Amino acid sequence: MAKEVKNVEYGLEKIFEGAQDFLPLLGTDYVEFYVGNAKQSAHFYKTAFGFQSEAYAGLETGVKDRASYVLRQDKIRLVLTTALKSDSPIGEHVKKHGDGVKVVALWVEDARSAYEETTKRGAKSFMEPTVEKDEHGEVVRAGIYTYGETVHMFVERKNYKGTFLPGYEKWESDYNPAPTGLKFIDHMVGNVGWNEMNTWVKWYEDVMGFENFLSFDDKQIHTEYSALMSKVMANGNGRVKFPINEPAEGKKKSQIEEYLDFYEGPGVQHIAVATDDIIKTVSDLRSRGVEFLSTPPDEYYKAIPDRVGAFDHEVKEDIRKIQELGIMVDADEEGYLLQIFTKPVEDRPTLFFEIIQRMGARGFGAGNFKALFESIEREQAKRGTL
Ligand code: FE2
């Protein structure tokens, strides 16, 4: 008898008992990208992904060294920032890494305490607690470094009623493509160097109070050619999940190594965004020009009913439709999930997006790793980096 599984926005209950609460997190606040041309990036995320214009800071608002565009879709907030002059840490970041994620900002009740608790446990400071004010109130922010040059910013906004942050103005645009059904960030994955995964797992445990709740070794995550290892870290209430990958030895070059070569160091590999209608979302994204990895072969789709059936679940969606769109399916005891991965969203083979719909499953698609990595390797082969 097949079990009824629900689409869940899980993690709102306390599910990771081992995690500590010296750093209570309310969720992800924003993700800031440092890019070469923020105006054009903003246009891309609006047109291709259906993000909505929310706020802007730049010369017109009195900011002299940078321009930042804030985009929103449901609970996801992206900030696209570019330098206005060559003499800028933002410009240096882009020169070294290309376009990429600089800040994964976390929403907290108390940014001063978050900074104190993490720095006293060994976090390297990026920004001391800073109060920013305007007529709508005040925001307190503080930041620490995580892997590479990536930063976690703690954002306390309980005393703020304005748009985004002080210094930003509401961005009213005449160009407003419809949203594509993206709802919230499910997880964000970091790539770190050879043999560094456990160092960063320990860092998230010790400094952030996270818990390691899933691990995959290179015996599970490999193809004929390449391999990687991954551990998933989650905070106490399960709202924030950061898998950490490191490359592993294989016959050919690991996709993680390719990332490290082109990003020139550790950084955010992919942002997984949740939808509750993946067929509609992916159809929409494809029609807007978002490029996805190639569709797995026929045999993959023929095997789905049995793979999911082995866990006593039944896929509700039309498998023909799923195959047409190149969506992958995985299952565990609790349910199943549907997922698909974009190609990198910039010229360097670095950051990409995942679209995910959870139908009860809490995993990360381990059953798809092989099919997925074979698809990535086909792209690596074209780039001459396999
Ligand atoms: Fe993922």
Image (cartoon, grey):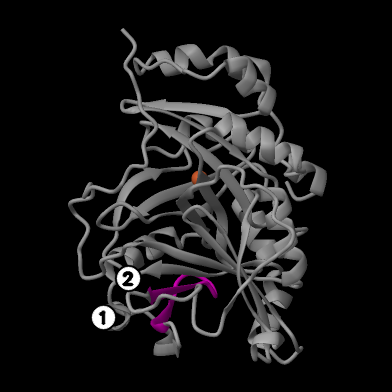
In which quadrant of the rendered view does residue 295 lie?
Answer: top right
- Residue lying at 58% horizontally and 16% vertically, measured from the top left: 319
Q: Looking at the picture, does residue 108 appear above or below residue 211?
A: below
Q: Amino acid at mark 1?
A: Ser
Between residue 96 and residue 308, name the one nearer to us: 308
Say which of 230 and 356 sits in front. 356
Residue 108 numbered mark, or none: 2
Q: Inspect the magenta stretch and tell me whether residue 142 lies in it.
A: yes
The image shows residue 116 at horizontal and vertical percentages of: 28, 83
Location of the N terminus (image quadrant)? top left
Of 218 and 168, the residue lying toward us: 168
Per the image, the residue denoted by label 1 is: 113
Residue at position x 66%, y 65% in the image? 263
Amino acid residing under circle 2: Val
Q: Residue at x 26, y 69 (%)?
A: 23
Please say if 78 is above or below 5.
Answer: below
The magenta stretch is 137-155
The residue under the point 39% across, 75% down is: 155
